[in-house]
Amino acid sequence: MSRVILSRMHQRLPPRFRLLGLLPLVFFLAQVIHYWRYGGLGNLAWMCNVGNLLLAIGLFFDQRELIRAAAIWTVPGLGIWFWYVWLSGSTALSSTLAHVGGIIVAVFVIRRVRMDRIAWLYAFIWYLFVQAFSRLAIARELNVNVVHFIQPGWENAFGSFWKFWLVMTAAVAIALWLIGLVLSLIWPLKTDVPEADSRVR
């Protein structure tokens, strides 16, 4: 029976379903064109932007850990974008597609792929990887993913950047865990099998 459960859990996504990866890829490419035209290509490394690329890769290659990690990140990505970009009135169509379109695709896909309890950990590891990349490869003045200096408005709360970074990283880990938990309660990873299959050994 355990083999049947594992087999059902690891059934490959149908090719037509995996073509949904074209949507987040288009959202990402739209941002590439936007930043190419107006400058600041390093902004593509923000978690919410590069998350669309991760979601596309996960779908194309049926890598569910990548899909779940990207899906988790669409939630805080949408909230941060809404607060810092949308409310400022400076958003572009490509940015709206990347954030609103990204979370719509992610929710649709997670309904099929489901969410497990450790997906938040993959999302956190992805966050640390992108943080390191942003610090090493992206221009300091862009402060992409807040890896070079304290987010404006928080300077008085922290004595140094590294204190700020440690608190922010801990807060991110907790937030990702909570988001992953909620999503796993809404769309839990199914391990049940039909009654007829339960006789298989």
Image (cartoon, grey):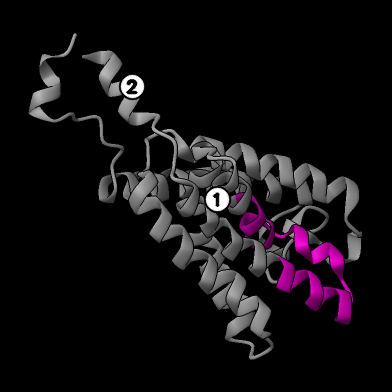
Q: State the residue position of label 1.
A: 70
Q: Quadrant of the N terminus?
A: top left
Corner quadrant of residue 3? top left
Q: Which mark is residue 139?
A: none
User: What is the magenta range?
Assistant: 29-54
Q: Amino acid at mark 1?
A: Ala
Corner quadrant of residue 196? top left
Residue 33 is a magenta residue = yes
Q: Which residue lies at the image location 79% right of the left edge and 65% below the top edge? A: 43
10 Å neighbourhood of mark 1: few (<14), some, or many (≥20)?
many
Q: Taking 86 as reference, is 99 above or below it? A: above
Drawn side of residue 79 relative to residue 129, left or right: left
User: Rounded to the nearest whole Å, what is the CA distance between mark 1 and mark 2?
Assistant: 23 Å
Q: Taking 62 as reference, is 52 above or below it? A: below
Give the residue at the far top of this rendering: 201
Judged by depth in the image, the label closer to the viewer, 1 or 2, is: 2
Q: Taking 187 as reference, is 3 above or below it? A: above
Q: How many marks?
A: 2
Q: Taking 31 as reference, is 158 above or below it? A: above
